[in-house]
Amino acid sequence: MTKNGRNMTRLTYLIITLFILNSCGDKTPQKLPILGNVDIQYREENGKTVVDTLYPTIPYFTFFDEDSNIVHNESFKGKVWIAEFFFATCPTICPIMNSQFKKLNNETDKFKEHLQFISFSINPKHDTPSVLRKYKKDHDIHAKNWTFLTGNENETHRLGIENFLTFAGRDEEAAGGYAHSGSFTLVDKSGHVRGVYAVTNPDLTVNQKEYKRLKNDITNLLNFEYHVK
């Protein structure tokens, strides 16, 4: 091989290497899935059968917030939600969950205009708006993009299980009379559930891997699907 040939080969390898490194640096992460049971709809278009995939969305809901305002889905329109289900008198898992929720809220502060944190009470008989307002104050929660909601108990439990894909319900044998998972749910701007994260384990320890996954998914969803930097 001539000297010029060897130089051209080295140059070619250098260009390929730089291209690979640049491609890896700009690699778009895999798109988050849409969770839940999809439905199929058939329709006729120009004499052909077209199949549409219908992805589940969070249904319309109405609740009271901690300031006794009536809120519903449209109240959070245009935002990505992170939701939890808890109750104010919970003596075990809830304090840990809300500690992680608060940490996550603080660590995503640069995205606060695009994120809505929602805490649904599963014990509305006790957790009235005034109780939730006091709960926020006692736990030093001042974030404007974090709302506590209370409403119909059966509807709240159904919403958690069927739509937010996290367990919430009565359990007389559980501490405080209610049982729920320690997970958080990520919902996109269209109302699709994009992830469920078991941040708090049943043994009351924090699952750091799940917490990190949620935080990364929030960033990737905003960065690459909604172009928020």
Image (tube, helix red, strand yellow):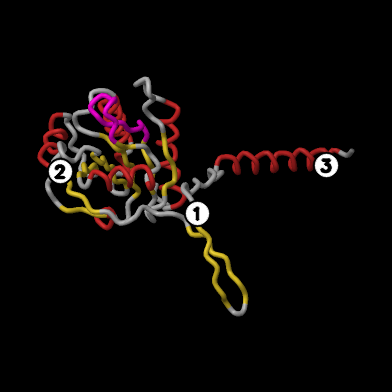
Mark sitting earlier along the chain (2/3)? 3
- Say whether marks 2 and 1 touch (CB < 8 Å): no
Residue depth check, mark 1 versus mark 3: number of the one nearer the observer: 1
Left or right of 137? Residue 203 is: right
Residue at the spot of label 2: 66
Count residues near mark 2 (Cα–Cα under 10 Å), then give few for <14, some for 14-19, many for 20+.
Answer: many
**Image coordinates for residue 191, horizontal then vertical, percent:** 38, 53
Task: Classify residue 203 by image quadrant.
Answer: top left
Count residues near mark 1 (Cα–Cα under 10 Å), then give few for <14, some for 14-19, many for 20+.
Answer: few
Q: Which residues are magenta?
A: 170-183
Residue depth check, mark 2 versus mark 3: number of the one nearer the observer: 2
From the viewer's perspective, is residue 172 above or below residue 125? above
Residue at the spot of label 3: 4
Q: Amino acid type of disc 1?
A: Val
**Image coordinates for residue 115, horizontal then vertical, percent:** 31, 46
At 21% from the left and 39% from the top, the residue drawn is 143
Q: Viewer-proximal residue, 91 or 115?
A: 91
Q: Amino acid type of disc 2?
A: Glu
Mark sitting earlier along the chain (1/3)? 3
Q: Viewer-proximal residue, 49 or 25?
A: 49
- Say whether marks 2 and 3 touch (CB < 8 Å): no
Q: Amino acid type of disc 3?
A: Asn
Q: Is 181 within the magenta? A: yes
Mark sitting on residue 38 = 1
